[in-house]
Image (tube, helix red, strand yellow):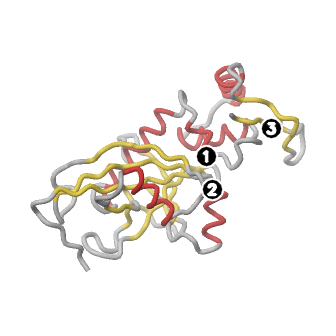
Amino acid sequence: MREELRRDRLYVAVDLMILTVRDGRLHLFLSRRGEEPFAGYPALPGRFVGLDETAETAVARLISEVLPVPEPFLEQLYTFADIDRDPRGRVVSIAYLAIVPWQKVRALQASGQTALRPFRVTPTEEGGLYLTGEDGETLSGSDLAFDHGRIAETGIRRLRGKIDYTEIGFHFLTDRTAFSLGELQTVFEAVLGMPLDSSNFRRFILNRYEKSGRLRQTEQAEKKGRGRPAALYRFD
């Protein structure tokens, strides 16, 4: 069934780009459209903004419906307003970036509380991206409904550009009150798509956050296999 829009009206929608780090790789969550236009196509979760709600209210309601995790990181990404971005009519989309730790998503999947599918993100040198599903399905940005490929590409560039000078990377961690610098390095490597030198990374993080008091070493330690246990840190 195709949802009809009036041609003489302007509609506002919110689209949601949800990211996580799973097994050391960045993943994007997609849904599957059940109606025209683009029936059967993979897409970002989205909905129209009601007359009685703000965009922030609409996107908060959206994420609670498609991926009900407590207190996800959420920020406005960009407004997409190309005239022909929706074949039904004039629709402006306010896109949001959400970050959710993988452990919380896995619990929702196990209990059947989400139908979203994770796709591994592989950026291209030209600024595009490839997406690989758990079943081996491979997509490019142009395979997504509407202009959702462009939204995803914009979000990945924004994330990669911000991770060095903002706190956004910490939101991928399962527990920000007890994590190792190795766990945090895995997040940075997943987002940037390349390995990092452990000594340089440790020095960078401690210089930026420990001296300011935002990052504090706890009395706990992480024991994995042989060798010296890794110190655990708390980020405030």
**Horizontal side of residue 139 vs 103, given as left or right:** left
Q: Is residue 155 above or below residue 148?
A: above
Sequence-wise first label, 2 or 1 = 2
Q: Is residue 73 above or below residue 46?
A: above
Sequence-wise first label, 3 or 2 = 2
Residue toward you, 142 or 66: 66
Separation of disc 3 and disc 2 at Cα? Answer: 19 Å
Q: Amino acid at mark 1?
A: Phe
Specify the quadrant that holds the C terminus: top right
- List x then y, in percent, for residue 225: 87, 48
Q: Residue at x 28, y 69 (%)?
A: 38
Q: Which residue lies under the disc numbered 2? A: 102
Q: Amino acid at mark 3?
A: Leu
Marks 2 & 1, CB-CB < 8 Å contact: yes
Q: Is residue 127 above or below residue 148?
A: above
- Crowd around label 2: few <14 · some 14–19 · many ≥20 (10 Å): some
**Horizontal side of residue 69 vs 152, given as left or right:** right
Separation of disc 2 and disc 1 at Cα? Answer: 8 Å
Q: Residue furthest bottom?
A: 1
- Crowd around label 3: few <14 · some 14–19 · many ≥20 (10 Å): many
Instruction: Name the quadrant containing residue 164.
Output: top right
**Horizontal side of residue 187 vs 45, given as left or right:** right
Q: Residue 212 got which mark?
A: none
Q: Which residue lies under the disc numbered 1? A: 172
Q: Residue at x 59, y 59 (%)?
A: 69
Residue toward you, 51 or 176: 51
Q: Residue at x 22, y 48 (%)?
A: 81
Sequence-wise first label, 3 or 1 = 1
Marks 3 & 1, CB-CB < 8 Å contact: no
Q: Is residue 30 above or below residue 54?
A: below
Where disc 3 sits, the SS reads: strand
Q: Amino acid at mark 2?
A: Trp
